[in-house]
Image: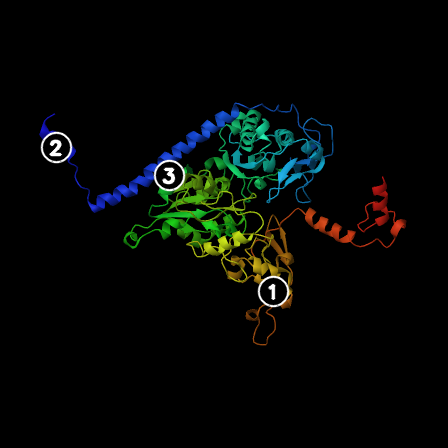
Amino acid sequence: MDKSSSNQIQRKRRLSKKERKAVKKQKPQNSLAKTNNEQEDNEKIIEVNYLNSYEPIEVPSAPSADIVVDGKGTSSLIKNEHDEGGGGNEKKLGAWFPNALLVKCAVSYTNTGQLLLHGSSKEKAESIKPASNPKASLVLFYQYTKQRKWSPNEVKLLMTYLSKIAKQKNLGGRFRVAQEGVNATLSAVDMNHEEGGPTASEILRHIAQDLKNFDSSVFSETDFKYIDDLSADRHFKELKIIPVQELVYYGIREEDASCNEGGIHLDAKEYHEMLKKDNTVVVDVRNHYEAVLGRFDGQQLQQSKKEEESRSAEYIDPRMRKSTDFTTWLSKPETKQKLENKTVLMYCTGGIRCERASAYLKKEMGSEVEGIYQLKGGIERYLKAFPDGGFWRGSNFVFDKREAVSAAEKDGCGGVIRKDKKKKNQRKAKSKDDDLSKCVACGVFWDRYVGKKKCFTCGVPVLLCDKCMSKKFDKTIELMLKVRCPLCMEENITVPASKVEFTDNGVKSKIGNTPDILLNKDNKNKNNTPAQKQKAAASVCKWGGGHAKQKKFARKMKQTSCRFGSECTRKDCFFSHPDRQTEKMKE
């Protein structure tokens, strides 16, 4: 090589300002792609390592005799302590879920780290030495049976198998099972791994393998989303196995919108790039009370003034109270106008709600849009791929004990509100996310659904800060209308949810009268008399299975002594019987 050529190689042309900016933009993308690949490789390596200690749990040859099939193909529970896969810790879940199984965990922890031993498993749990610094793990997944639906007998067999696994592995969480597939959030906690016991992360990966052993044609394709190294209190206290007719209820028949014909799945990086594109909309398939905590609209906020001509994806919130509102929203002319000739991106928490929603959108408007895409693995996968949050803004509402998760806080914000968390909330209020979530009563920044506070007029969860909760707005009749969700306030809904009768999972059928005292002055005419016409919410959420109400009533009655005293012949009497309690103590 001659000197002239070597000098040419040594000399490097100075990059222009425009070229340097382009290089800076490319660097994060290249590192991101590397991060995504590394994450996938690491997950595979971890799974292989954990399977080295795997001991399979045998699949029962037949469903438990505890589970019988009713006329609709769902299951119900009959007490039997001696069956192969059932009995022991199973209990009914409540009047709304009479066919569900509930298996108590032997070991769980409070949010202060206190060890809890439960129920009939207490003797077994007392023999277990707790880990010195226990950690919990979660796994989120769903799977549709694409080739064929399970038979009712196979659903029973899976329920039997899960209850068997739960008792051996101290498994917690929720498991919805139908003939069309499963939707699950499962948790585990470390079980004294210092002395050879399994870790939480091992337990969940072993369970994933157990499910593959149960039906490899279904679960071999499942995207198991693991969240490891969480605080021990993130572990559920029980496993609820709930048989349902439809995993996500939209009121849409399978033949009208098959999940096999939904949108194109994009991984986090591909979805991120699509959010930058012009002539694109991003549809939030979650409920509005979830969307107020966080959403994909960061791409719009990050646009500089120079880039106004090339707009990124426009965020659309269907403003749903429940999933059944999706079809109503899509049927509106203004909705179709927003989506026409656009590329449609859809997302939800973990991906399952997009399956049916994207299939229905494709059926209704497939020829009128440029394409339908959905985020594979949902927000959970996206926040893993983009540790800085990417285009996500705010927190991701989740259906486990984390409550809500942000890019900077994977452990979530669940648990008792402490002083340090209050100060953190005050600091967070000054950030870019302070316009998302606010207390419905006073309007200050607040991003936690605590106290199980529900909208007075539609029943969805509402954000009520700790100061307003102490004022008991929801228990003072003159102030009840303050405890309404943003949708009800905007729509001026005044009819209480308790006064509305519903059928078909939330379709309005009959409206009662609202007490005059609940009406604001704005709802009164010139004669200062209450307006006759009042507005009710188009859909109402009903919560709980009825068992909590019964327990509260029983506790209340136990505080009152039975007037018949020892002469009372009712063994199941609601009222207090001190004489009976004394006899039990003597026994």
Residue that numbered label 3 is attached to = 270
Q: Is residue 370 visible in the rendered structure shown here?
A: no
Residue that numbered label 1 is attached to = 479
Q: Of marks 2 and 1, which one's residue comes earlier in the chain?
A: 2
Q: Amino acid at mark 2?
A: Asn
- Looking at the rendering, in which quadrant would you find the C terminus? top right
Contact, mark 2 vs mark 3 (Cβ under 8 Å): no
Q: Give the foreground label among 3 and 1.
A: 1
Residue depicted at 60% across the width and 42% down the height: 113
Residue 208 falls left or right of residue 41: right
Marks 3 and 1 sit apart, C-alpha to C-alpha, by 48 Å
Q: Amino acid at mark 3?
A: Glu
Q: Amino acid at mark 1?
A: Leu
Secondary structure beneath dot 3 equals: helix
Write down the quadrant of residue 95 in the picture.
top right
Marks 2 and 3 sit apart, C-alpha to C-alpha, by 42 Å
Q: Give the foreground label among 2 and 3.
A: 2
Residue that numbered label 2 is attached to = 7
Q: Of marks 2 and 3, which one's residue comes earlier in the chain?
A: 2
Extreme residue toward the right, this view: 567
Residue depicted at 28% across the width and 43% down the height: 24
Residue depicted at 65% across the width and 23% down the height: 61
- Looking at the rendering, in which quadrant would you find the N terminus? top left
